[in-house]
């Protein structure tokens, strides 16, 4: 059996390696358009920022290693240009010489990835405007930055140098994870960074109030945000600088521009074979990664798959699914009955030492698809036991089915411990867990790592309290017939909502007579905990009461300007 794999990075390399482990006899050929196979796309921004010091660190395996260890033939700088499904052949072009050859296959696997969107805007081809996809891309960015470093003119030994040489300016267009990572890395290099985003929020898979936290974090770390700004073009400004033009009339100066406005599945080759392309622009595959044409498989960023939670078609360009899909395609080719379960979009992005992460569905997606059978809670647990030094709070949002408690999604932002909580939610979600299961999850604990009641347990307990009716919940965006704040007066001096009635929790039992019995009482505290205790007191004394989820922390963190 001869298997040709197009694309030698995440999905393609995984497929080749897995296939060899399952079938010693298969003839495997990997063709890769670029100069490298198996490189770490995810590390590219960190090479720009100097965190990864050497380009060689980005290349995880090369053609010689594939040949020696796996007996896989790799041809780099070799592009697949067309497929003939009838003849079961692929036409290949040597990128250096232009020479065309034809190779026959028994099975063909496409893992060509997704290309960065480079809109045809005026000035888009000016020097100094980059995308980030490949090692040569980041090499070019590094060269540009080195070539355009300010001239010290002998001032480099003078300690006040930084104050007399203006910082170089970078504009990053696009507020997704590649945009954020590039913004952070350019800021690390000392550039003055502006991040321009067309929509009203960064990180569009997150809900806006959670993304707001990300925005605060970026701003606090010196990145200037231009949200709601539509880039309309680029022009050469004064000197060698560029200007990024926006629909609102801004001309943002930049010594370098990095475009990170998203990716589109590479389906050009697939179209030559007549493969079906779906509503999300990706190659259509079944759960065994088979395309619409016999003996052709497709994996990774080029395909669209089923969303695990909503069952809708989704295009999720992430390394984890690409690797798993490559492995599944290999297993199916080798005769196994492996299946891809679908995606739940689990992702994380670093934020100047902190992180934002999510899994499953967002509230805005639920609203968009008209799904109203859900509830949400906001919690602010510590990253580890509060009594152990260094604990930092996490902002978390959990979405779950109102009818049966099934976990639908989770989002978290914080300085520490975001990854392990979202990973736990991700596993729970894939196994169809409910918030009642989260209450019972047995997780690691020692004071420097977590709490005996982990944030994952805590999320389950709070959500289960809501569903069991122990803690009816309300949110800041709801109407509030009567707002009761149970914090101490000193806390109100820092921040309060106008029109609230303040009865500190310790005084509540004695002052119930001051509360209305004809209106629902919505109870606020700092994070929701004291409000929950107060809600329990009120409910057991015959009042209608709800806890404002997340209390003042959700209000100040998510809705403050
Ligand atoms: P790719 O890894 O892109 O590989 C496709 C390869 O196919 C390319 O090398 C291309 O040259 C080659 N190719 C295309 N067409 C042809 C052809 N006709 N003939 C021959 N070769 C061809 N994901 C995460 O989960 N976490 C992260 O932190 C993360 N960070 C990222 C940072 C950056 C800067 C980028 C660009 C991506 C990042 N990703 C991240 C996404 C992740 O890298 C991709 O989801 C993953 O690499 C997709 O694998 P793939 O095999 O589908 O495509």
Image (cartoon, rainbow, N blue to C red):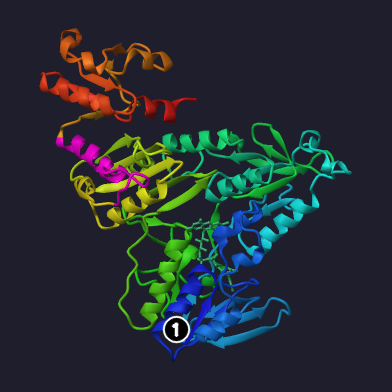
Q: Residue at x 29, y 19 (%)?
A: 480
Residue under the image location 44 percent in, 36 percent down: 208
- From this view, report whether residue 277 is shown above or below residue 183: below
Task: Work out whether residue 276 or residue 391 is closer to the camera in this orientation and state it.
Answer: 391
Residue at 15% in and 8% down: 513
Going by the image, does 397 lie left or right of 227? left
Q: Residue furthest top?
A: 514
Q: Secondary structure at mark 1?
A: helix
Q: Which residues are magenta?
A: 444-468
Q: Quadrant of ligand 1?
A: bottom right
In the foreground, 10 or 314: 10
In the image: residue 228, left or right of residue 236: left
Residue labelled with disc 1? 20
Check if residue 263 falls in the magenta segment.
no
Q: Is residue 96 above or below residue 193?
A: below
**In the rendered structure, does residue 460 fall within the stretch colored magenta?**
yes
């Amino acid at each position: 059996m001869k298997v040709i794999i197009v694309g030698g990075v995440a999905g393609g390399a995984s497929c080749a390696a897995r296939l060899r482990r399952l079938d010693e006899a298969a003839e495997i050929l990997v063709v890769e358009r670029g100069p490298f196979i198996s490189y770490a796309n995810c590390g590219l921004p960190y090479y720009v920022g100097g965190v990864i010091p050497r380009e060689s660190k980005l290349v995880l395996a090369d053609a010689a290693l594939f040949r020696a260890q796996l007996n896989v033939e790799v041809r780099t700088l070799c592009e697949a240009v067309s497929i003939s499904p009838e003849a079961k052949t692929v036409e290949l072009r040597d990128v250096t010489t232009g020479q065309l050859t034809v190779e026959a296959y028994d099975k063909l696997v496409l893992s060509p990835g997704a290309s960065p969107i480079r809109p045809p805007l005026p000035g888009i081809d000016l020097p100094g405007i980059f995308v980030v996809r490949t090692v040569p891309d980041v090499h070019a960015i590094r060269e540009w930055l080195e070539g355009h470093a300010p001239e010290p003119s002998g001032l480099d030994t003078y300690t006040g140098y930084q104050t007399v040489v203006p910082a170089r300016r970078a504009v990053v267009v696009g507020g997704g994870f590649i945009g954020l990572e590039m913004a952070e890395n350019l800021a690390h290099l000392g550039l003055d960074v502006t991040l321009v985003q067309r929509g009203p929020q960064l990180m569009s898979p997150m809900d806006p109030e959670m993304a707001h936290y990300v925005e605060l974090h970026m701003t606090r770390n010196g990145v200037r945000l231009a949200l709601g700004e539509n880039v309309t073009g680029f022009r050469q400004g004064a000197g060698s600088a560029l200007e990024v033009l926006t629909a609102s009339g801004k001309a943002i100066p930049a010594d370098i521009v990095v475009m990170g406005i998203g990716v589109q599945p590479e389906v050009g080759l697939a179209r030559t074979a007549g493969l079906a392309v779906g509503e999300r622009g990706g190659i259509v595959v079944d759960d065994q990664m088979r395309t619409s044409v016999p003996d052709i498989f497709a994996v990774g960023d080029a395909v669209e798959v089923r969303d695990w939670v909503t069952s809708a078609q989704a295009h999720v360009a992430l390394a984890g699914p690409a690797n798993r899909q490559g492995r599944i395609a290999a297993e199916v080719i080798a005769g196994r009955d492996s299946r891809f379960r679908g995606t739940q979009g689990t992702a994380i992005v670093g934020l100047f030492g902190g992180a934002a992460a999510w899994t499953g569905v967002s509230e805005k997606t639920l609203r968009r698809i008209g799904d109203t059978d859900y509830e949400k809670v906001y919690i602010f647990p510590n990253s580890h036991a509060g009594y152990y030094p260094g604990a930092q709070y996490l902002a978390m949002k959990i979405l779950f089915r109102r009818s049966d408690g099934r976990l639908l999604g989770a989002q978290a932002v914080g300085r520490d411990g975001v990854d392990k909580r979202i990973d736990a939610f991700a596993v729970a979600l894939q196994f169809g867990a409910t918030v009642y299961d989260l209450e019972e999850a047995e997780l690691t604990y020692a004071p420097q790592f977590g709490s005996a009641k982990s944030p994952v347990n805590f999320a389950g307990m709070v959500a289960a309290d809501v569903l069991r009716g122990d803690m009816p919940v309300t949110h800041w965006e709801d109407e509030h017939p009567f707002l009761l704040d149970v914090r101490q007066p000193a806390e109100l001096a820092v921040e309060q909502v106008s029109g609230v009635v303040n009865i500190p929790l310790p005084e509540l039992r004695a002052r119930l007579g001051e509360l209305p019995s004809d209106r629902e009482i919505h109870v606020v505290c700092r994070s929701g905990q004291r409000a929950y205790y107060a809600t329990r007191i009120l409910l057991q004394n015959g009042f209608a009461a709800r806890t404002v989820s997340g209390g003042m922390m959700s209000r100040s963190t998510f809705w403050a300007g």
